[in-house]
Amino acid sequence: MPIVVLIIIGAAAGFLATRLMRIEASIPATLLIGIVGALLGGLILRSLASVMGWMSGFVGAVLGALLVIWIWKTYLRR
């Protein structure tokens, strides 16, 4: 169940992250960025989630999506 929640949160986080980083991405790319970022951020910030609740999971998802966008822009998009 937690992975399904991370995927749903990741879709919203991907949308927010693409807007914060000011990139134009297709809807599937935005969803993929958000989902991968949510999974990464969710794993990294799992300890905070137990302390602060679901909001830290959303923050982790956004941070993870921002990291994925940075890696994508820096290394993959040339």
Image: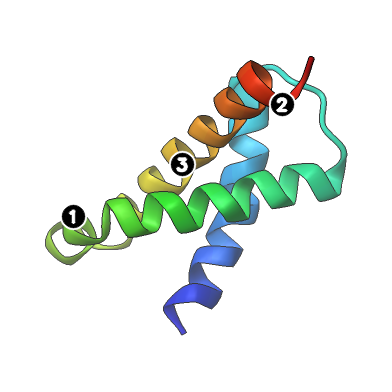
Residue drawn where x is 60% and y is 36% of the image: 16
Position of residue 73 measured from the top left corner of the image (x, y, whole percent): 67, 20
Number of the label disc, if any, that sits on residue 48: 1
- Height in image: 29 above or below 36? above
Residue labelled with disc 3: 64
Find the distance from the CA under tag 3 to the CA under tag 1. Answer: 14 Å
Amino acid under label 3?
Gly
| Quarter of the figure with the C terminus | top right
**Foreground residue among 16 and 61:** 61
Q: Label 2 belongs to which residue?
A: 76
Lateral position of residue 38 relative to residue 17, left or right: left
Q: Tag 3's secondary structure?
A: helix
Is 68 left or right of 28, judged from the image as shown? Answer: left
Query: Which mark lies nearer to you, 2 or 3?
Result: 2
For mark 2, give the secondary structure. Answer: helix
Q: Position of residue 44 (x, y in %)?
A: 30, 51
Question: In the image, is 17 to the left or to the right of 57?
Answer: right
Q: Position of residue 21 (x, y in %)?
A: 61, 19
Q: How is the image coloured?
A: rainbow
- Left or right: 1 with respect to 26? left
Counting the numbered discs, the total is 3
